[in-house]
Amino acid sequence: MTPKTLSLLGMARRAGKITSGESQVEAYLKKEKGFLLLIAADSPGAVSKYRRWAEDSHIPVLIDGTKQELGTAIGLSPRALILVMDEGFAQAIIKSGTVS
């Protein structure tokens, strides 16, 4: 995961434009809300469960980094999932990383 991506995640959290953790992300995916789903590469269970769900909702998916990296980027404990709720931040993160 690039330093720019990690920085953008931190800015998005400070702006209140992300949600993280399985229960919160799941609630928003059920409503088909969000602009980008980030999944930690070291969380195969989350990849298998949430990747298809997001893609079915036409939400781009970025599988990169570790749970520790994602959590540190947003100033929280390790996180397997981060859902970006702002289109501008999502586009900036997509440009800085590889999205599937």
Image (cartoon, rainbow, N blue to C red):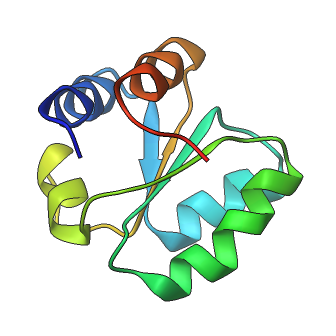
Residue 40 seen in this snapshot: yes
How many marks overall? 0
Judge from the rendering whether residue 31 lies leftward or rightward of residue 41; answer left or right: right
Residue at the image position 20 percent from the left and 32 percent from the top:
10
Percent of width and height locating residue 4: 19, 25
Residue 78 seen in this snapshot: no
Judge from the rendering whether residue 53 lies leftward or rightward of residue 80; answer left or right: right
Percent of width and height locating residue 55: 79, 53
Residue 13 found in image quarter:
top left
Percent of width and height locating residue 98: 45, 39
> In the orientation shown, which residue stands out farthest toward the right?
56
Percent of width and height locating residue 93: 40, 27
Residue at the image position 34 percent from the left and 25 percent from the top:
96
Q: Nearer the viewer, residue 73 or 51?
A: 51
> In the orientation shown, which residue stands out farthest toward the bottom?
45
Residue 86 found in image quarter:
top right
Residue at the image position 56 percent from the left and 74 percent from the top:
47
Judge from the rendering whether residue 49 lies leftward or rightward of residue 77; answer left or right: right
